[in-house]
Image (cartoon, rainbow, N blue to C red):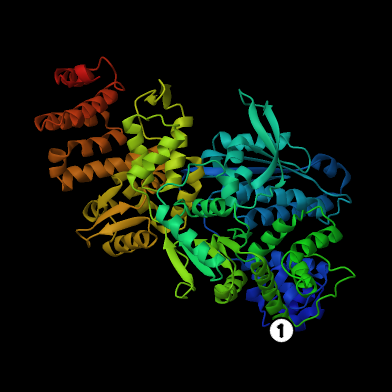
Amino acid sequence: MSQPTSVPEWLMAVGLAEYAACFARNDIDMSMLPHLTDLDLKEIGIISLGHRRRLLTGIAELRPADARPRPKPQTEAERRHLSIMFCDLVASTALSTRLDVEDLRVAVGSYHRCCAEAIEREGGFVAKYMGDGVLAYFGYPQASEHDAERAVRAGLALAEAVPLLDTPAGSPLGVRVGIATGLVVVGDLLGTGAAQEQAVVGETPNLAARLQALAAPGAVVIASGTRDLTGGLFEYRDLGMVPLKGFDRNVRAWQVLGSDAAESRFEALRAAGAPLVGRDDETSLLLRRWEQAKAGKGRVVLLSGEAGVGKSRLTQVLLELSAPERHARLRYFCSPHHQDSALHPLIGQLNHAAGIRRADADAVRLAKLEAVIAQATDSPREVLPLLADLLGIAPGDRHPAIDLPPPVRKARTLEAPLTLIEGLAARCPVLMIFEDVHWSDPTTRALLDLLVDRLDALRVLLVLTFRPEFAPPWRDRPQVDLLGLGRLPSEQCTAIISHLTGGRVLPREIASQILDRADGVPLFVEELTKTVLESGLVRKAGSNAYLATALVGRTAIPETLLDSLLGRLDRMPETRDLAQLGAAIGRQFSYELIAAVAELPPPLLARSLERLESAELIFRRGAPPDAEYTFKHALVQDAAYGTMLREKRQRLHARIAATLESDFPEIPVRQPETLAHHCAEAGQTEKAADLYIAASARATAASNNIEATAHLKRAMALVKTLPPRAPRTVELRNRIMLSGWWWWSA
């Protein structure tokens, strides 16, 4: 059947042609249909819940043809951190024995479409249909900082939606879902034609498949790695350590029961962190503005900063410091999953404040909402029908149904929460916090426009947090302060490390690595320190120190940060190879070197570097051809480098080494250790060891004995990987021993 070309034609196809005038009056054409929400349909006058559901189902069926292009899978295999979902149709064998094959085809097709819709709605990638099973990846080909959460939400949506499918089965279908998260290799194309798939290799897909088999019908079971990343966002039942076929150890598993009632994403995901460090001035400003608000002069503070820099932690401190005082506290949380859901933060706040649960009957929900509204106004009848309608609660017999033109209805709906805020402020001071406004929907921003203009005469402090890419339209208002959070200096980062280690001192080289890679971002400091403490790299020594358990290497990127970092790189797939090449060169690289190694036409190279720079993945000093580039975060460099397979890494390092020798002859003479590093990573072990010995001799001549020793240790580590009796190995070992430094520094 061909796709409809007009809204009336589409309405006729879904059997609701009587609404053509509603759509026409509101200037809704085919291009707008995929963006409509349930609230939008209410606003244009569609009262029937059943009809709205039919329309939304019809819109969902249009989306595959009309949706914006999805990121294309990579054509080259990569190391990736994925959340992998296996879902399986319950009792499919029994179904096949009692249904005609054509009816079975219809039932399985409906199930597959339902799976694809739920998975793609949460940003997943359907990798393969296997009869009645579905394999999906979250984090490929486009990573995001919420991949594990998205996978779980898709699983819960499937568990709820599949039994509601209308199929020839004659009884509700059921599904089992298993989800695991971890490192895999993905991207190898297997098969041809319709059978072609993006294969994934690693323990993670096997674990997800076994957890799916463990799940009861209608259940979502996840591995510990996924549970660690989703934190308190969901309610769980601990299944304990379970034996799984093919695994030589028991595995911890969890059943996801539903979304948790945690008010804040920060509290759900970062419940136990380090104290706030280095934000005394910012805290003082917030407290001064709070005092002004309590005195009747409403204030707004715009709190801007990159991810992980401490915005939510600062608002948490404000909440803690204001707790002893009598006041009303309103918290709103914008979500990356609901940027097109009108007034989602307000709906969440009202549901949380009223204690409304999904299982509550309409009468119970209405009574809870009434109780909350009564705390703010003596005339609840003015706002209750509007807010009840917003929450999808039937108004009951005691309250009139809303019968207003859509524009008036929308204006009254936006006015209702303002009425509550004004009522609360007349009773006591109000502290309002709007988190992550960069994820807000357009209607929420319209509500904030009204609120900011109105609160200067109210006892209200409004704090809005957002990332730097968001441009707040309120910054020039007289009652507004813009407060930017920067990165912390090393001494304050050291204080965070000390708190997490309980005052014990980490080995100097490990602490330095944490500080270098965290770049002053408090969250990075916390997660890197936790990774070190949990990885076995150190052990306690006495009452006040840790000792390294082995030769210190580069610690892995914490899984809590990896998806976010990869997501930034995935948003620019056309520059991926150049970013990987830059990462192989190092944290810093020159235009001259990357131009020589990349072998790209100068205009294309310039455009690609400009795109990486505009995305703030790299910074530039100077102008080409004399420009120097630096990765904004050491962890961004690590993420770009970490996606490459060993073979590609070796190939790039070999090209870099050859280019340094041919085009930059001063490097082998003045910085032999730089060339040695690339030779070692390229698998040119003997040459690398030789260069490290030369670097040691050069450092010794300058009395830089510590550096000389470090170079010799690297040379010795390389020599130990060579055939022990080979003449070249013996020669290199003798040269290291003759240096003298090895003996007293080992």
Q: In x, y percent, where is residue 84?
A: 60, 43
Q: Is residue 660 left or right of residue 214?
A: left
> Label 1 is placed on what type of residue?
Ala
Extreme residue toward the left, this view: 701
Q: Is residue 305 visible?
A: no
Q: Position of residue 93 (x, y in %)?
A: 81, 40
Residue at 22% x, 29% y is 711
Say left or right for 566 vs 714: right
At x 58% / y 58%, what residue is drawn? 336
Mark 1 highlights which residue? 24
Q: Does residue 117 appear to the left or right of 642 in the view shown?
A: right
Image quarter of residue 331: bottom right
Disc 1 element: helix
In the image, is residue 208 above or below residue 474?
above
For label 1, the crowd category at 10 Å Cα-Cα, with few meaning under 14, some 14 to 19 and many 20 or more, is: few
* Point 12% across, 32% down: residue: 698
Q: Is residue 152 visible?
A: yes
Q: Position of residue 700 (x, y in %)?
A: 12, 29
Choose top left, top right, bottom left or bottom right for residue 554. top left
Give whichever of 640, 198 is nearer the camera.
Answer: 640
Q: Classify 151 as above or below 346.
A: above
Q: Quadrant of the N terminus?
A: bottom right
Q: Quarter holding the C terminus?
A: top left
Residue 191, compared with residue 599, is above or below; it is above
Up/down of 221 relative to 442, above or below? above
Q: Nearer the viewer, residue 651 or 672?
A: 672
Residue 495 occupies which quadrant of the picture?
top left
- Identify which residue, 649 or 674, lies in the foreground: 674
| Image spot of residue 48 (x, y percent) | 83, 71
Comparing 39 with 479, the one in front is 479
* In-image side of 241 versus 693 (left or right): right
